[in-house]
């Protein structure tokens, strides 16, 4: 089969297998089937649900501690490693980033991470991002993970209505797929 036809078919079929999610921050987004969303509103219901594997319930119990400490949402692919996940955090914060300032902002974030863990890691990519279209600005950054060996951090940060939205993917394997999921999630956000 011709490669162009195959790619076209994959692009055409992929959006059909998306699932819609509702954030506690009052927006919707899409991710491929198989993801679950964990937040303070649903963690206990999910843990009590009998239709999840023991392995997945064990993962969720570890995230319950994180959810108690901070207002974050965690997106897990039920089939993947617990190291592959997406975090959503939102802050009442406002600042501006543009093409001239984006690299400086990426380095500032990386420096804060390195200071916290006392470990030097490399910045892989840093640039402005096109999505979501409604955002005041949006940027993408990718670096070696400051906390775990052989893990990559991929992050889209954008500003909307004087709030900072941070979508962070942490991946150990299948990082290209995680990056694609992260980009599609942000592209699909609707308020």
Image: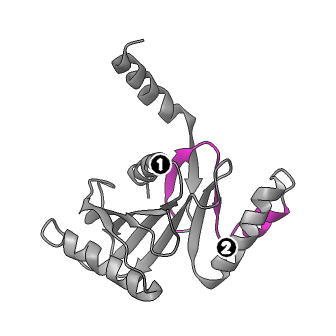
In the displayed structure image, the side of residue 89 where residue 139 appears, left or right: left
Q: Which corner quadrant of the image does residue 76 belong to?
A: bottom right
Reply above or below: 33 against 40: above
Judging by the rendered image, the residue that carries numbered circle 2 is 40
In the displayed structure image, the side of residue 59 where residue 141 appears, left or right: left
Q: Position of residue 68 (x, y in %)?
A: 67, 81
Q: Distance between the residues labelled 1 and 2?
A: 23 Å
Name the residue at 41% across, 66% down.
Answer: 144
Name the residue at 42% across, 20% down.
Answer: 6
Magenta includes 44?
Answer: yes
Q: Give the range drawn in magenta.
A: 25-48
**Residue placed most toward the observer, 79 or 91:** 79
Residue 71 visible in image = yes
Of the two numbered discs 1 and 2 in the rendering, the one whose residue sits closer to the viewer: 1
The quadrant the N terminus occupies is top left
Mark 2, Cα crowd under 10 Å, few <14 / some 14-19 / many 20+, is: some
**Residue placed most toward the observer, 117 or 90:** 117
Name the residue at 21% across, 69% down.
Answer: 102
Mark 1, Cα crowd under 10 Å, few <14 / some 14-19 / many 20+, is: some
Q: Position of residue 32 (x, y in %)?
A: 56, 43
Q: Which mark is residue 181?
A: 1
Q: Where is residue 8 in the image (x, y as percent from the top left)?
A: 38, 23
Q: How many marks?
A: 2
Q: Residue 159 carries which label?
A: none
Reply above or below: 83 against 109: above
């Amino acid at each position: 089969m011709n490669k162009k036809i195959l790619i076209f078919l994959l692009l055409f079929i992929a959006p059909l297998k998306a699932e819609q999610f509702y954030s506690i921050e009052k927006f919707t987004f899409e991710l491929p089937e198989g993801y679950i969303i964990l937040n303070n509103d649903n963690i206990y219901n999910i843990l009590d649900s009998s239709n999840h594997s023991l392995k997945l319930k064990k993962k969720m119990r570890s995230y319950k501690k994180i959810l108690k400490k901070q207002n974050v949402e965690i997106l897990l692919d039920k089939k993947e490693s617990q190291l592959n996940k997406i975090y959503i955090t939102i802050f009442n914060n406002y600042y501006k980033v543009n093409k001239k300032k984006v690299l400086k902002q990426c380095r500032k974030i990386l420096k804060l991470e390195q200071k916290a863990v006392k470990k030097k890691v490399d910045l892989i990519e840093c640039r402005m991002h096109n999505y979501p279209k409604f955002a005041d600005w949006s940027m993408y950054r990718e670096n070696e993970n400051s906390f775990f060996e052989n893990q990559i951090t991929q992050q889209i940060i954008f500003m909307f209505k004087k709030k900072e939205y941070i979508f962070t993917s942490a991946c150990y394997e299948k990082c290209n797929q995680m990056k694609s999921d992260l980009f599609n999630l942000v592209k699909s956000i609707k308020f």
